[in-house]
Image: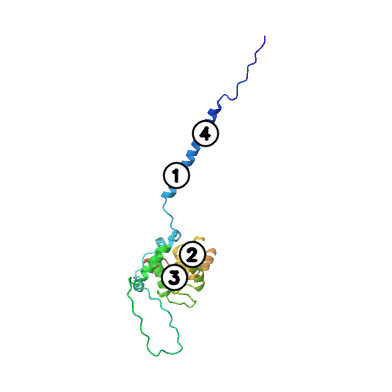
Amino acid sequence: MRRTRSSPRSFRSTPLWLMLAGGFVLLGIFLVALTLTVLAGALRLISAPAQSPTSAAVLLVAPDLASLAPPAARPASGALQQMITSPLPTPTTEPTATSSPAQTPPTPAPILPTSAPPITYRALFQQVGDAYGIDWRLLAALAFRESRMDPGAVGRDGDMGLMQILPTTWDEFAPPTVAAEPFDARHNLEVAAAYLLYLQDKLNEIGHGEIYWVLAAYNWGPNNVRRLVNDGGNWDDVPARQRQYVADILEAAFGVRMNE
């Protein structure tokens, strides 16, 4: 008997159009999921609070009270309180030498009325402090300690102005702040504020960006602080003069004194 050979079943048992349709459906689901993920990430970025450009200076806004003793019994410096409410001195120029004395006294220039009262030290410290993210009280106490708030002060090492900035420091930090005159109170203060933030960034690299280390570096120099820390030293190993300097500034600024 002759056997009939059955024809093989076609491998295309599922229609091609159906396979393609299924593929398109899966691709569509993937694209929708990807779009939703991207949108969710964008919404998170929009709703998140903006990062302040001066957020790195947060440790310069207030001291770590846990590391400080209770306020000292003696009151804060009355001289500092008096100075911050005083108006800034009007910049003056040095008199120019003449070859012969004048025959008649010069006629004084008329005093012109001004539309705004002179700015006070406090207002200046607040403006610069807000711009750089530094507590204005810290700037005021530091300026009082460095120069007794004298914009024309010159130190024995050539330190200049309100916060006694060395010429080398001025040459490095004045251009970025567009400061031109070291004996102008605002220019000098802005350079000092920029330098404080620089010191904090450098000390953060070695885990010592606290406010008292920043102040010590301002007075003692960042290289000395870095060398001490790298050699295993701690705050007790800082020279007594610099520790006293820091304690005086923190007490004047915030009414607290470091444990000694």
x then y, percent, for residue 80:
36, 72
- Quarter of the picture holding the C terminus: bottom left
Foreground pick, 37 / 141: 37
Amino acid found under the numbered disc labelled 2: Tyr
Amino acid found under the numbered disc labelled 1: Ala
**Mark 4: few/some/many CA within 10 Å (<14, 14-19, 20+):** few
Amino acid found under the numbered disc labelled 3: His
Foreground pick, 230 / 10: 10
User: Farthest right residue?
Assistant: 1
Q: CA distance from mark 2 to mark 1?
A: 37 Å
Q: Is residue 177 above or below residue 7?
A: below
Q: How many marks?
A: 4
Residue that label 1 marks:
40
**Mark 3: few/some/many CA within 10 Å (<14, 14-19, 20+):** many
Q: CA distance from mark 4 to mark 2?
A: 57 Å
Q: Is residue 51 above or below residue 1?
A: below
Q: Nearer the viewer, mark 3 or mark 4?
A: 4
- Which of disc 4 and disc 1 is earlier in sequence? 4
In the drawing, what numbered circle is on residue 24?
A: 4
- Which of disc 2 and disc 4 is earlier in sequence? 4
Residue that label 2 marks:
198
Secondary structure under tag 2 reads helix
In the drawing, what numbered circle is on residue 187?
A: 3
Q: Is residue 52 above or below residue 245?
A: above
Using the rendered view, name the quadrant where residue 59 is placed.
bottom left
